[in-house]
């Protein structure tokens, strides 16, 4: 089940609010300028599937989003606990960073944890299969997939180069809870 926890940036161990209803999560995140929707992950795709397989399975949804929002590039991240580069990939996303463009992810399978640092609050969102998140460009955030990742996510970009991060150098991500393997779908 998707879950949103909201923290004061100076109190990383005590959530001010917890939401697990999709409509509540969408409402709270919309107020913070973040898109959150639940879609049907209708095509059976498992972590480890190739990028071509995932894109082919969701071509109609991808084309619609690209036309609606002007996205220029799409790719797929598909990780399992057996992936040889899982630790390096996890570390890459764990530091607070921003992007000059929106970061859009649709979770086709599995789960991952987006943590957004907006104003003086930290929004910790566990995304699961069927969740789409759109993080506005310039939003400070980080992503965790746990030590034992299990997810497939379609990523859309307006930048043809794809994922380009500007790291903030702030160590805040070290203070907040990480994704626990038990929090993910299996």
Image: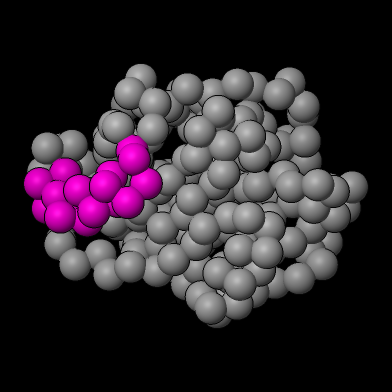
On the question of residue 154 being in view, the answer is yes
On the question of residue 142 being in view, the answer is no
Decide if residue 60 is on the left or right side of residue 26. Answer: left
User: Residue 149 is drawn in which quadrant?
Assistant: top left
Image vertical order of residue 55 relative to residue 4, above or below: above
Decide if residue 10 is on the left or right side of residue 183. Answer: right
Decide if residue 74 is on the left or right side of residue 135. Answer: left
Residue at (12% x, 37% y) in the render: 52
In the displayed orientation, state which residue is furthest to the right.
Answer: 10
Residue at (25% x, 65% y) in the render: 41
Residue 62 belongs to the span the image colors magenta: yes
Towards the viewer: 24 or 90: 24
Task: Residue 83 in the image: state x and y as whole percent.
Answer: 30, 33
Towards the viewer: 120 or 72: 72
Task: Residue 51 in the image: state x and y as whole percent.
Answer: 18, 37
Q: In which quarter of the image is the C terminus?
A: bottom left
Residue 43 belongs to the span the image colors magenta: no
User: Residue 154 is drawn in which quadrant?
Assistant: top left
Colouring used for the render: one colour
Task: Residue 150 in the image: state x and y as whole percent.
Answer: 35, 49
Towards the viewer: 147 or 44: 44
Magenta span = 55-71
Residue at (71% x, 24% y) in the render: 168
Task: Residue 97 in the image: state x and y as whole percent.
Answer: 63, 29
Residue at (33% x, 68% y) in the render: 39
Q: How many labels does the image show?
A: 0
**Which secondary structure class fits the magenta region best?**
helix
Image vertical order of residue 3 relative to residue 12, above or below: below
Decide if residue 12 is on the left or right side of residue 24. Answer: right
């Amino acid at each position: 089940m998707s879950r949103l926890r909201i923290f004061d940036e100076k109190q990383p161990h005590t959530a001010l609010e917890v939401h697990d209803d999709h409509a509540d999560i969408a409402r709270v995140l919309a107020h913070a300028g973040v898109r959150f929707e639940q879609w049907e992950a209708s095509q059976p795709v498992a972590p480890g599937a190739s990028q071509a397989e995932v894109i082919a399975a969701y071509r109609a949804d991808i084309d619609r989003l690209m036309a609606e929002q002007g996205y220029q590039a799409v790719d797929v991240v598909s990780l399992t606990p057996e992936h040889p580069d899982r630790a390096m990939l996890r570390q890459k996303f764990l530091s607070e960073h921003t992007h000059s463009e929106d970061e859009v992810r649709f979770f086709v399978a599995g789960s991952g944890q987006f943590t957004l640092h907006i104003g003086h609050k930290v929004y910790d969102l566990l995304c699961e299969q069927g969740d789409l998140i759109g993080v506005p460009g310039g939003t400070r955030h980080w992503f965790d997939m746990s030590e034992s990742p299990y997810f497939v996510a379609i990523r859309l970009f307006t930048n043809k180069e794809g994922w380009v991060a500007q790291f903030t150098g702030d160590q805040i991500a070290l203070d907040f809870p990480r994704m626990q393997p038990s929090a993910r779908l299996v």
